[in-house]
Image: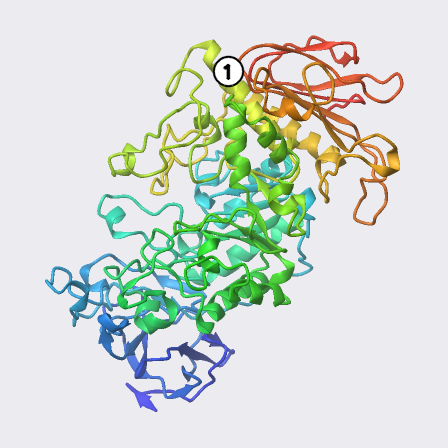
Amino acid sequence: MTDHGVKILPGRPLPLGATWDGAGTNFALFSERATKVELCLFRSPNDRKESVRIELPERTDQIWHGYLPFIGPGQLYGFRVHGEYAPARGSRFNPNKILLDPYAKLVGRLPSWSDELHGYRIGDPAADLSFDPRDNAAIAPLAMVADTGFAWGDDRPPDVPWHRSVIYEAHVRGLTMQHPEIPHEWRGTYRAICSDPIISHLKGLGVTAIELMPVHCHFTERHLHERGLTNYWGYNTLSFFAPDPRYGGLVNPLGLLREFKSMVRVLHREGIEVILDVVYNHTAEGNELGPTLSLRGIDNETYYRLQPGDPRRYEDFTGCGNTLNMRHPRTIQLVMDSLRYWVQEMHVDGFRFDLASALARELLAVDRLSAFFDILAQDPVLSRVKLIAEPWDVGDGGYQVGNFPVGWVEWNGRYRDSVRRGLRGDAGLKAELATRLAGSSDLYGPSGRRPYSSVNFVTCHDGFTLSDLVAYDRKHNELNGEHNRDGLDDNLSWNCGVEGPSDEPAIIELRDRQRKNLVLAMFLAQGVPMWSHGDEFGRTQQGNNNAYCQDNPLSWMEWRLSERDRKFLEFCRRAVAFRRAQPTLQRRDFLRGPLAETGNIKDVYWVSPTGSELKDGEWSDDTSRAFGMVLWGEGAALRDDQGRPVHGDTVLAIFNPGPARVDFRLPAPRTDNASWWLVFDTGGLGDRAEWTAADSFPMAGHSIVVLTLQSWTLP
């Protein structure tokens, strides 16, 4: 078939997308209900219309395909898809709109906001039922044919066991934009992530995996664009395959894949895994009033969940206007192909799934046996990488902490909330806090999962930073332009007596103590600790708990550290180093109490301020909220990956969440002539290094003390 002098051959239906073979490019697009698909070629991103429009000649198993000789990397293209425009029946084809290939490996032009991005006429009384005949070729997103070749050399995944993992959640721009040792042209890019200053910082903090906030190419919502803001976080996906070009430091988009892969290769060489935060629950096309950018115009009924009885409208379990239809095999294929691509071609080590409950909904309820979980569990590639769920969405029954299948770990929202409430001194939380510190066996034990199924975090990108958590009782989101209505109202925070910045020494000291307490609680708990970037020193968003649209210094890390920041960073490094040195804090199995092989010794026991073991009735007694956790470091109950006995220190961690000083009598070490050695005292009242069972340790209010049976110093 020839059009404008271009000859197109039948080509192949698979693989989907644009595949260059060295001599030409095969184009393949799935659409079950289309009547015709046209491939549109553009010479440059500045073109206002395509230079060539050519009909794909073949249709095999609902896949439209064709092969163009001599077309190779760098070619810009899009699709026009013909079919019925009947929104009331769920059909939204409009061939006047150039559509982005869902399998595009590169996005060569981002869309520009204009009414012509919509399939209907903005302002028409019939709203989205109307049809827009205007062409959008000048502003539509364009894909680019890619060369995926790369010399990986001997690259291999670090393959860090879950129980030894320390995750660092970070934003590509936020982490690097203000680092004074990174060249200006690198800042905010994949190249900056693997620069020497960032690598040095991550390794100094004991990080084993960096979890990058969304790097899939995304699009900013119109309401933000019109207010001069941007979707900084990136949870508004435009392409599930293409890395966002805004994080590339190269002028030529063809170099973007090499830049990303080089980042992964360097991080792997340093023993750091790469985990991607991925958003497969919704797309940037929004609800029925949103733009037509890709999936909506290719096959709306296949890719999105439409309301039963009213297919004009979308089911929305995400709060973002639409939900991907994970009940359709072609939608599941799109997600699985994307995941495998990022593992096999881009060498990433795992994924954190945003609003993962939305992916597991079969009808309305979240289903642990959904097709999505079944296919992932059986996939020979994806079942071997790290899978992390954000175990909730915004729909009814969406909060699913503890309910994901074996093979998944979860952001433990119960841990976050219990630690925030417990360490600010809320009543009635002694037993709950102890359960979270012990690995949340109530959530993960019954299904046969392990302590490392719990990702323990106090803060993340969503909400207050650690510094703001102890400085603000209320959100302050005015800069977002939504009159402070956005973001959570209940943050379980505590301003320590003054809202916002304070020069009062007592307030500053209490806030630093609370930050230390929250960090220690994270690294003393069984499970996988996770940092939010910048919490290791003093990053603040000035009380903004929803900075998703703030691509500016409010969200970026400030690397010029004050003396206070430096001291806190050193404390954080010591906390991580202590955990890494203590096998009993990195258990693969749940604590179980009495150990048959050691007589009457328990792997964990809990003590009261009298030094005696807590009795059942004392757990609910709030007369004193202080309690201690003793983790036994000896014995055959603790084994390494080869099943060999592991011997470590016995650790005593004492928590005093209340405001009053407590003189806590130290329990007998159960080892003759042994002493307790002080490692951490956030309250600063401990006046010596060595302590005996006869001693009462003076604990300041709102403090944590850690001791071991052997003297321990930072390696």
Residue 151 seen anywhere in this rendered image of the structure: no
Percent from the top left, x then y, of residue 286? 30, 58
Height in image: 62 above or below 122?
A: below
Q: Is residue 275 left or right of residue 447?
A: left
Image quadrant holding the C terminus, namely top right
Q: Residue at x 51, y 68 (%)?
A: 337
Q: At which x and y percent is residue 137? A: 24, 69
Pick out the residue farthest to the front: 617
Which amino acid type is shown beneath numbered disc 1? Leu
Is residue 48 visible in the rendered image? The answer is yes
Q: Is 43 situated left or right of 657 in this image?
A: left
Percent of width and height locating residue 113: 24, 56
Q: Which residue is mark 1?
A: 510
| Residue at (57% x, 23% y) in the render | 516
Residue 79 placement, left or right of 462? left
Q: Where 467 sits versus 237, above or below?
A: above
Image quadrant of residue 486? Answer: top left
Regarding mark 1 in the picture, which secondary structure is present there?
A: helix
- Could you classify mark 1 by the number of other residues whose Cα lies within 10 Å: few (under 14), some (14-19), or many (20 or more)? many
Q: Quadrant of the N terminus?
A: bottom left
| Quadrant of residue 684 within the rendered picture | top right
Colour approach in the figure: rainbow
In the figure, is residue 706 to the left or right of 198?
A: right
| Towards the viewer: 616 or 264 | 616
- What's the residue at 55%, 11% (across, down)? 660
Q: Position of residue 29 (x, y in %)?
A: 40, 77
Residue drawn at x 50%, y 23% is 426
Res 471 quadrant in image? top left
Q: Name above or below for residue 624 compared with residue 312.
A: above
